[in-house]
Each structure stands twice: as structure tokens, then as C-alpha cells.
């Protein structure tokens, strides 16, 4: 997914948050920030993998080289798992808010007077 598509998806999440009135709430903002950071980490790790491949050389004592699995793969998998959990948290935040409950309550007497 390219940067433009990611930005579009982030904008959709923020728009949904605005619709239900949580866009400025601390929990939503900090969770969204963590998610955005994790996505950037994933993109960087993916680039590192693409540049170096699955197997890399590791230098041991006395300059001996050995072929090992690229450690970026493990870091990428862990970051993706964390990002997925953070995305689940964002969804829970967005789904747990009842938009009707967040609307300002009207005074029944004022409603009667407005007729």
C-alpha cells in the first residue's frame, strides 16, 4: 500500500471519529498515533527486507561469515502483530461509542415551547 492510500485510510478513520465525536479524546488520539508509528516502522522494515533479502551474512569472531535469516523479518512480524492489535483497539474505540448518547440533550420544556 502506498503512502497516498495510507493517508486516505487515516483520513477515513479520523472522519469516522469526528462523526461520533471522539477525534479529540486522549485514548483515540494516542492509539491512532501509535498505529501510525507502527505502520511507518512496518514500511521501513519492509524496505530493509527488500534491499537485503531473506538471508544475510553475519560476521562472527575472527571475521568468519555465516549465512543467517535476516533479523528484520522477525522485527517486521512483531511490528505487524502489534499494529494489528492497535488497529483492533481503534476499531473497539470507534464501535464502543454510541453517537446518540454523545449528542447534547435538549430540554423537554424548551422543546414544548418551540412548539
Image (tube, rainbow, N blue to C red):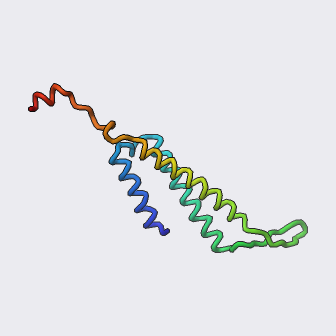
Quarter of the view holding residue 47: bottom right
**How many labels, in total?**
0
Q: Residue at x 49, y 45 (%)?
A: 30
- Residue 107 against residue 3 in the figure, above or below: above
Quarter of the view holding residue 21: top left
Q: Position of residue 13 (x, y in %)?
A: 41, 54
Quarter of the view holding residue 11: bottom left
Q: Residue at x 39, y 43 (%)?
A: 22
- Closer to the camera, 114 or 59? 114
Apparent side of residue 28 relative to residue 102 in the rendered image (left or right): right
Apparent side of residue 84 relative to residue 8 in the rendered image (left or right): right
- Residue 41 against residue 85 in the figure, above or below: below
Q: Quadrant of the C terminus?
A: top left
- Residue 115 against residue 8 in the figure, above or below: above
Q: Residue furthest right?
A: 62
Q: Position of residue 75 (x, y in %)?
A: 67, 60
Q: Residue at x 12, y 28 (%)?
A: 112
Q: Position of residue 114 (x, y in %)?
A: 10, 32
Q: Position of residue 63 (x, y in %)?
A: 87, 71
Q: Residue at x 62, y 64 (%)?
A: 45
Amino acid at each position: 500500500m502506498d503512502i497516498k492510500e495510507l493517508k486516505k485510510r487515516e483520513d477515513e478513520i479520523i472522519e469516522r471519529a469526528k462523526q461520533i465525536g471522539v477525534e479529540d479524546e486522549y485514548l483515540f488520539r494516542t492509539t491512532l498515533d501509535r498505529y501510525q508509528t507502527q505502520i511507518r516502522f512496518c514500511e521501513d522494515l519492509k524496505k530493509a527486507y527488500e534491499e537485503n533479502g531473506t538471508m544475510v551474512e553475519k560476521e562472527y569472531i575472527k571475521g568468519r561469515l555465516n549465512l543467517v535469516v535476516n533479523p528484520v523479518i522477525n522485527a517486521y512480524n512483531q511490528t505487524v502483530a502489534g499494529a494489528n492489535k492497535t488497529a483492533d483497539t481503534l476499531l473497539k474505540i470507534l464501535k464502543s461509542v454510541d453517537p446518540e448518547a454523545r449528542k447534547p440533550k435538549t430540554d423537554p420544556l424548551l422543546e414544548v415551547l418551540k412548539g
